[in-house]
Image (cartoon, helix red, strand yellow):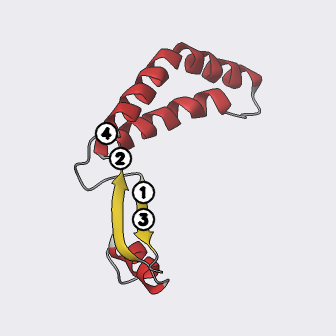
Amino acid sequence: MAGFPVRAGPDAGVRQAGFDRIRVTARGNPLTVACYKGMALGLTLLLDADGNPLRRTARRSLGIALLPVLGLLATIGTLSLRSDWGEDCLGYTVTGHRPG
């Protein structure tokens, strides 16, 4: 998609494939992105494969202690999907109609 703004790239490809009434919709917003990034940090503590058993146990213990925060971030992130604002999002959904 070099040379196209992010929203124009998917639109152009779908239009070339013969679709019309194309709609490009952002999935999420800056709050959704922030929640997902926080969840990723928390999950790395739980899923860390560090070879040192002491460090691995310490990280997993911290990850387990932060599980309620992870759940809260997941809830906020999911609820924030209902609003569309800002430039930062998780990606785009492209829908269209093929005539005929």
Residue placed under numbered mark 2 in the picture: 28
Of tags 3 and 2, which is closer to the observer?
A: 3
Q: Which mark is residue 91?
A: 1
Residue placed under numbered mark 4 in the picture: 82
Disc 2, disc 1: CB below 8 Å? yes
Q: Residue at x 22, y 49 (%)?
A: 85
Name the amino acid type tagged 4: Arg
Q: Nearer the viewer, residue 49 or 13?
A: 13
Q: Secondary structure at mark 3?
A: strand
Residue placed under numbered mark 3 in the picture: 94
Taking 32 as reference, is 85 above or below it? below
Structural distance between the alpha carbons of marks 3 and 4 = 17 Å
Between disc 3 and disc 2, whose residue precedes?
2
Between disc 3 and disc 4, whose residue precedes?
4
Structural distance between the alpha carbons of marks 3 and 2 = 14 Å
Name the amino acid type tagged 3: Val
Structural distance between the alpha carbons of marks 1 and 3 = 10 Å
Q: Nearer the viewer, residue 3 or 49?
A: 3
Structural distance between the alpha carbons of marks 4 and 1 = 15 Å
